[in-house]
Amino acid sequence: MLRNTLFIKPEPNISPEVDLDINDSSDFDSEETALELPIDLIQTPGHLIVRCPIAGAGIHDIEISLSTERLTLKKHATIDDPEKVTTYHYQECFWGELERDIDLPKPVDPDRTRASLQDGILVVTMPIASRTNSKVIHIQE
């Protein structure tokens, strides 16, 4: 499911010569609001894995925060247009700040969590924490 995705289609009755002003959106202020990143959260026998498409961002543009029960992903990169844009005919991609808070269904071990970014896909692999927090204590002589 895509969340807060902006798809703006031209109306069929508008002639092609008319410029569509799609930047005038009262519902969305890109400087104040960060949209949510779409994710897949899957579980394997020993891990929770989050996969997230993040186009146009490098590893230094992404911030990952993790506790045992919550994962937060933030993307800070933007894409600058190499030429002066006079009109967007379609603007379906959002290149500003994106973020996502995810409540995890099981506790995870933040110390053993790994993240990778390849071909625009962020993958965060979180080992599921053991159910017991007990430890055997040996008595010293």
Image (spheres, rainbow, N blue to C red):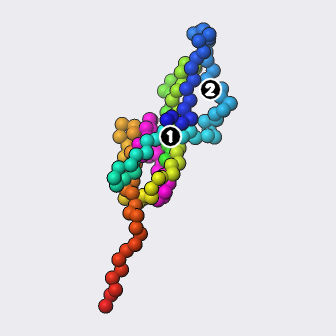
Q: CA distance from mark 2 to mark 1?
A: 21 Å
Category of crowding for the residue at label 1, using alpha-carbon neighbours closer than 10 angstroms: few (below 14), some (14–19), many (at least 20): many
Crowding at mark 2 (Cα within 10 Å: few <14, some 14-19, many 20+) = few
- Is residue 88 at least partly visible in the picture? no
Quadrant position of the C terminus in the picture: bottom left
Q: Residue furthest left?
A: 141
Relative horizontal placement of residue 73, taking residue 141 as reference (left or right): right
Q: Residue at x 58, y 40 (%)?
A: 34
Left/right of residue 15 with respect to residue 77 in the rendered view: right
- Tell me where residue 59 sits by quadrant: top left
Question: Disc 2 residue type?
Answer: Asn
Q: Residue at x 45, y 58 (%)?
A: 107
The residue labelled by disc 2 is 23
Q: Is residue 26 above or below residue 105?
A: above
Quadrant in the picture for residue 87: top right
Question: x and y percent of residue 137 in the render?
Answer: 36, 80
With respect to residue 1, does 43 lie above or below?
below
Evaluate whether residue 46 shows in this view.
yes
| Residue 37 in magenta stretch | no
- The image position of residue 138, as x and y in percent, is 33, 82
Q: Amino acid at mark 1?
A: Leu
Q: Which mark is on residue 37?
A: 1
Q: Which residues are magenta?
A: 50-71
- Which of these two is toward me, 87 or 4? 4
Q: Secondary structure at mark 2?
A: loop
Residue 79 on image: x %, y % = 49, 33
Q: Is residue 129 left or right of residue 23?
A: left
Q: Nearer the viewer, residue 126 or 80?
A: 126
Q: Is residue 56 part of the magenta span, yes or no? A: yes
Q: Residue at x 33, y 52 (%)?
A: 45
- Where is 82 relative to 101, above or below? above
Location of residue 69 in the rendering, given as x and y in whole percent from the top left corner = 49, 57
